Amino acid sequence: MLQTAPPPAIVQPAPADVDRRLAEIVALLSGKGDYAATFGERFRSEVPKARFDALAAQIAAGLGKPKGVERIDRANALEATATIGYERGRIGVALTLMPGGTRQVAGFSITGSAPRQDSFAAIVAEAAKLPGTVGFGVYALEDPAPRALAEHRGEAAAPIGSAFKLWVLAELAAQVAEGKHRWEDVAPLAPASLPSGITQGWPAGTPMTLQSLATLMIAISDNTATDTLIGVLGREAVDARAAALGADRLPVLTTAEAFRLKHPAAAALAASWAALTPDERRARLADPALAKVPLDPALFGDTAVRPEIEWFASPRGITKALDWLSRKGGPIALAILATPRADPHGLAYLGYKGGSEPGVLSFNHLARDAQGKWYAVIASQYRADAAVDPGALGNLSARALDLLGARR
């Protein structure tokens, strides 16, 4: 009697696969192990062993020898974040395993590093040494007002790039709570702005729910979606919300307005912009000539372009916006703000909105710890003369979040 072979068993990944690969990575960071056995072929082609070894040596120079895995946070059986301990500190890592039977590592990154005896004060002191104008703050969101745990230039306003979209999200959440709109309401997409985003390639007038627009605005910083929401909510309402939540300069520009004002063809309209009153700026924005200025992506290079034409706030100001969202934003706004991957910092909730353009960085995190306490970690850096490296500022933010996650 002929029989067909049974179908091959589907091998389900086990948590032990992550543990095993992490142990192998610790060995590789120590100069041992089998690189080809641990990492998949595609990863090895992008990160040759010599490059990995150079990174391992750089880490060891600062933190000493690796000692082992201290903590693992599993997103699922194939993805995890972890803390690897060293003699004088620790690093955060994220890894993804291949779904095939070998369970080799398909993705691996170092998310941050910290000395063994880290502190908010040490982090802020390092932030103060970064080039350019830097603001940094860690705040406990308490009654009656946020309290600074540590800060540098906490009251000094600086360019924040797309972080201004927190004000738009807050006003949308407020209007939904007041019954003026529903998250499922549909609005026509505004004419295209420049990227970032995806909707700049879609036809103007495409029907979009307000929740979809807000999700695109926060998750991928979609500029056209942002401009659409500002039109739906109303300029005066967005300005009022921004003023209450820490904006330093009004009116709140749409992204298309900002791009046009930075263009040389708008030099007359943009003249003395910082010195104008809010009403004088509004009059310039209403000038029909502004709409004729082209949206030109080639205008932007490695350094800041007309940095006075921006969105401005201080670390304390952005903290006001995150504090409002934590208290009054509601579950949908908080879900939109939430980071889309496993939290590597041991926190119960982590939300984020950043801003980035030539010469400008802004990293803004809203965190809730295991005890239900809320915090904000705000970091900004601005240079008029050069591009800004996101690695250093991002590492400081990650260290602060690690400390918040470890608070008991």
Image (tube, rainbow, N blue to C red):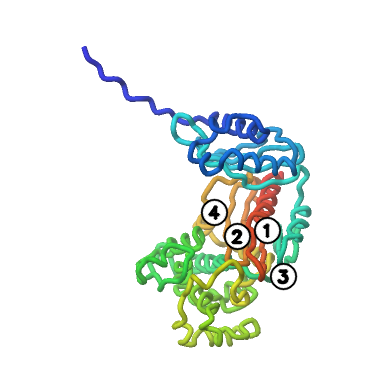
Disc 2 residue type?
Answer: Arg
For the residues marked 3 and 4, what is the alpha-carbon distance in whole angstroms?
27 Å
Q: Which sits earlier in the primary sequence, circle 4 or circle 1?
A: 1
- The x and y percentages for residue 275 are 65, 84
> Neighbour class for label 4 at 10 Å: few (<14), some, many (≥20)?
many
Give the left or right position of residue 389, taking residue 290 as reference.
Answer: right
Sequence-wise, which precedes: disc 3 or disc 4? 3
Reading the image, the residue beneath label 3 is 156
Q: Find the distance from the CA under tag 2 to the CA under tag 3.
A: 25 Å
Image quadrant assignment for residue 392: bottom right
Are the two marked residues, 2 and 1, in contact with CB atoms closer than 8 angstroms? yes
Q: Residues within 10 Å of mark 1 (few under 14, many from 20)?
A: many
Q: Residues within 10 Å of mark 2 (few under 14, many from 20)?
A: few
What mark, if any, has residue 141 been given in the picture? Answer: 1
Q: Element under label 2?
A: helix
Q: Earlier in the sequence, mark 2 or mark 3?
A: 3
Which residue is located at x 70 percent, y 57 percent? 140
Q: Residue at x 52, y 44 (%)?
A: 46
